[in-house]
Amino acid sequence: MAAKVWNRLTMGVCYYPEHWDKSLWQDDLRRMKDAGITVIRIAEFAWNKFEPREGEFTYDFFDEFLALCEKEGMQVIFGTPTATPPAWLTEKYPECLNARPDGTLLRHGSRRHYNYNSPKYRELSARIVEKIAVHLGQHPAIVGWQLDNEFNCETNVFYSNADTEAFRLFLQEKYGTLEKLNQAWGTAFWNQDYTDWQQVYVPRPTIHDNHNPHQELDYRRFIAHSTLSFARMQAEILRKHIDKRMFITTNGMFGHIDNHRMTRECLDTYTYDSYPNFGFPLDGRFDPKELNDRKWSRNLTEVRSICPHFGIMEQQSGSNGWVTRMEGPAPRPGQLTLWSMQSMAHGADFICYFRWRTCAFGTEIYWHGILNYDNRDNRRLQEVKRVSALMEKLQPVCGAASAAKVALLRDYDNLWDAEVDAWHRRLQDPSEKAVFEASQRTHTPYDMFFLHDDTQLCELKRYPVLIYPHALILSAKRADLLRAYVQQGGTLILGCRTGMKDMNGHCPMQPMPGLVADITGTTVEDFTFQSPAEAPVNALWDGEMLETPVFNDILRSHGDAKVLARFDSSYYRGEPALVENQVGKGRVLHLGSVFSLQNVTQLLRYCGVLTPWADTLELPEGVELTVREKDGRLYFFLLNYQSEPQTVVFNREVRSLTRGDTVCGSMTLPPFGTDVVTID
């Protein structure tokens, strides 16, 4: 259902009229407009303003504020207030509360303390959403609606009695019988067989937290199902009552949610909350060689996989922190612009800053907004004004698509399995980091692509190269899709442990790589973590070293498959480490290892996709390159994350959208400086 919502680059800000005296409202709106802000997001934590006591509804507060917004020409995104149920609700209906694994209820006083599956909470949530939608669904100032706030933020696990009841129903619908459940969960191990559905619970405390891994995998699927159901309930209510010109969104991106499915089924567009300042830890872990705030481009790449033309509902504008945890430095001059451009470079057509003014009370008094507590104009406000002017110059980029030719394949089954399975996580985390770092440091933009059961071949064919690092869980349907992709000319790169598990997380009695062995041309003969008692094992590829870190699958090649690299030490010295197999018009590269910056770089070079725009421009490593395409025109985003100037060299004449001039040869980006260039 996700669609292109913004027809021009648009600037907004989060605002909480309930936090401020009414005497400030009009001046705030006028100062926002003067800064180029045309949209505000409100009300996501304001249930009591509509229902101060159960069944007693009032609309005066927001009617007054929205009338002022209409008068001042300010557009509004209105949030449903279900992220913070009021005290009267949780006191009377404690069954609505979430709980710890031991059953202890999480009480009123913070946020997101509810569970999705309480019938009473769903009833009361549906009622407040409908009351608000009926009253405000045609309001001329409102342009969009946000569901809840940050689904599964703070916690993405739920252990209430209502969750156990709903989990049983979820499993009964999935498996039908206890016999099938026992088989899927492998309950013959450690005598875990169930003989009555009432014996089945959400995961509970066990010795050393050794939970059944197949139960845990289904539990994560269940949470995703519950979250989607709660979102869908609200979206369906809104669609019955709101004006068709209004869009529906929600802000994320948090764990145990199939964000792609939620976007398709519930939303018109997806929005993300971007806080790159988390890349600068103040606890002694800071490493200047790391990508730091540039790491948020990885998150934005994932958001783009959910919704190609997305929005930023919360863009960092000040330092971040709560009174209970988290801290961060203030953005340096230019970083607010840099981070805004980072979001736009990856597909954001709407930038909404969090927040207009730093809250003077509560947990988030250190989560700074554009203005400080004193309400005076400051350098951040001046920088927001400059971003507004910059966005006007970049309007041609609105709606442009990613031009990446390489994609990292992912799927939720393997992501959730890696949470359950420490061996899987030990492979996946460094491999995904390596793909991102190789993309950034070699200026080879990439996309993420999530496989679903309804993924079509045409969606994969746009990428000449796909990297699927560690698909331990692999279904026949996804294997067939990968086979068709390769046969029609694609290059597929696979890592160790591919095809180890079925969809329940069991290990079939067949050699890896299982369902894709026919296209890899390989069999895994042996496997091992690298031993700490030995020197690191690498491989030799045409006389050059190829890193093969962490874990090694010792391969055998079959048929016409070609061994490209062999391990250089340990008991498997000389055995195949990298095998290439031609399949139809394409090929598969099977690496018996975890991915690293070094081996990803070599693999991309071998596949002919490394640094694809080197003929056009040459960049230092400290500058990010992201490329968007629209109507056949390429737009090159250049982002300097360094506190020192960086020199870019253009090998052909380009035009700068930000400055309006043309340049061929060298150009200097100032500290934290940005530019967007195109070829006329």
Image: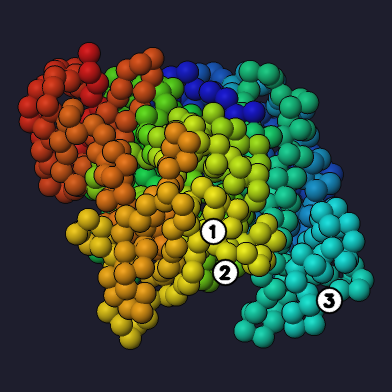
The kind of residue tagged 3 is Asp
Rendered image coloring scheme: rainbow
Report how far apart the C-alphas of labels 1 and 3 lie in the structure: 30 Å
Q: Quadrant location of the C terminus?
A: top left
The image quarter containing residue 489 is top left
Residue 195 to residue 11: above or below: below
Q: Is residue 261 visible?
A: yes
Whole-percent x, y for residue 455 in the image: 61, 36
Kindly identify which numbered label has been placed on residue 493. Answer: none
Q: Earlier in the sequence, mark 2 or mark 1?
A: 2
The nearer-to-camera label among 2 and 1 is 1
Label 1, residues with CA under 10 Å away: few <14, some 14-19, many ≥20: many
Please name the residue shown 60% across and 68% down the image. Answer: 420
Q: Earlier in the sequence, mark 1 or mark 3?
A: 3
The kind of residue tagged 2 is Asp
Q: Secondary structure at mark 2?
A: loop
Whether residues under marks 1 and 3 lie with C-beta atoms below 8 angstroms apart, the answer is no
Whole-percent x, y for residue 146 in the image: 61, 36
| Pointer 3 residue | 193
Q: Which one is in front, 386 or 271?
A: 271
| Pointer 2 residue | 421
Residue 60 to residue 678: above or below: below
Q: Earlier in the sequence, mark 3 or mark 2?
A: 3
| Pointer 1 residue | 513
Label 2, residues with CA under 10 Å away: few <14, some 14-19, many ≥20: some
Whole-percent x, y for residue 413 in the image: 62, 54
